[in-house]
Image: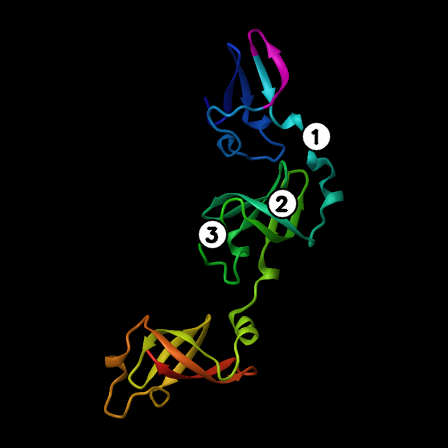
């Protein structure tokens, strides 16, 4: 069985106690994040009292946190595996029993995206180490060095004369607000195929996908000029 503070490990006809503190060298762990019912695991007997024995899972390997500051440095870039996902972030494993938190605020440029939309379990991702706390066995990470603002990405991937898609985000009497690859833009009625007697609100709806051509990219003003080809 698995409880909040310990698990009972069956060895032949005996039950051994595996305390929460003996699960991993990383502190503040939940037992269920490491073992499940009917798992077959290797443990070390650390204490015997009367008919009960206490065992350890973490002591099957040397404590990796003893030399953590020799192996990893604040600011270095490395790869890690996503081993747990929460609303507030994801736990990333660098090596067995060396885990840290990639906070939600460090996963996207604005820190507002849902964690589950950004990473999946067992993903191997690039991260930068923000902090190392050896005494608390804690690490923190960021993904921001690998992220680009929408405008920077747009300039790299688009060009004048290109025909692509845009999404209508807002409709006004004489203009449309659209989003093209994460970059907002405004299309005036003159840059649509409508004549003077036609109304934008009649021919377009919010969330419409429209085919546009890029007329101009103003890097200094971070603006893009578009014309609608077809809806």
x%, y% of residue 152?
56, 72
72 drawn magenta: no
Circles 1 and 3 in contact, beta carbons < 8 Å: no
The residue tagged 2 is 139
Q: Give the residue at x 58% y 28%.
A: 23
Dividing the picture into quarters, in which one does residue 20 lie? top right
The residue tagged 3 is 115
The local crowd at label 2, few if under 14, some if 14 to 19, many if 20 or more residues have their Cα within 10 Å, is many
The local crowd at label 3, few if under 14, some if 14 to 19, many if 20 or more residues have their Cα within 10 Å, is many
Q: Nearer the viewer, residue 202 or 4?
A: 202
Badge 1 element: loop
User: Which residues, given as a range, are shown in magenta?
Assistant: 42-52
From what the image shows, is residue 50 above or below residue 67?
A: above
Q: Main secondary structure of the magenta part?
A: strand
Quick one: label 2 or label 1, which is nearer the N terminus?
1
Q: Which numbered mark, 3 or 2, is in the foreground of this view?
A: 3
| Marks 1 and 3, how far apart at CA | 32 Å
């Amino acid at each position: 069985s698995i409880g909040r503070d310990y698990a009972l490990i069956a060895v032949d006809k005996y039950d051994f106690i595996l305390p929460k503190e003996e699960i991993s060298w990383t502190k503040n762990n939940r037992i269920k994040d490491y073992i499940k019912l009917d798992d077959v695991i290797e443990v070390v007997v650390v204490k015997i009292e009367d008919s009960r024995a206490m065992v350890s899972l973490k002591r099957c390997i040397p404590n990796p946190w003893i030399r953590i500051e020799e192996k990893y440095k604040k600011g270095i870039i490395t790869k890690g595996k996503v081993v747990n996902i929460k609303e507030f972030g994801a736990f990333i494993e660098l090596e067995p029993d060396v885990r840290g938190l990639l906070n939600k605020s460090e996963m996207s440029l604005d820190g507002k995206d849902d964690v589950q939309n950004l990473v999946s379990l067992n993903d191997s991702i690039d991260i930068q180490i923000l902090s190392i706390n050896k005494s608390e066995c804690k690490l923190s990470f960021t993904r921001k060095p690998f992220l680009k603002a929408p405008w920077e990405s747009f300039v790299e991937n688009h060009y004048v004369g290109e025909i692509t898609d845009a999404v209508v985000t807002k409709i006004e009497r004489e203009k449309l607000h659209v989003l093209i690859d994460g970059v907002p833009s405004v299309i005036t009625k003159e840059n649509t195929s409508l004549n003077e007697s036609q109304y934008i609100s009649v021919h377009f709806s919010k969330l419409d996908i429209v085919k546009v051509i890029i007329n101009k990219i103003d890097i200094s003003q971070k603006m893009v000029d578009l014309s609608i080809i077809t809806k």
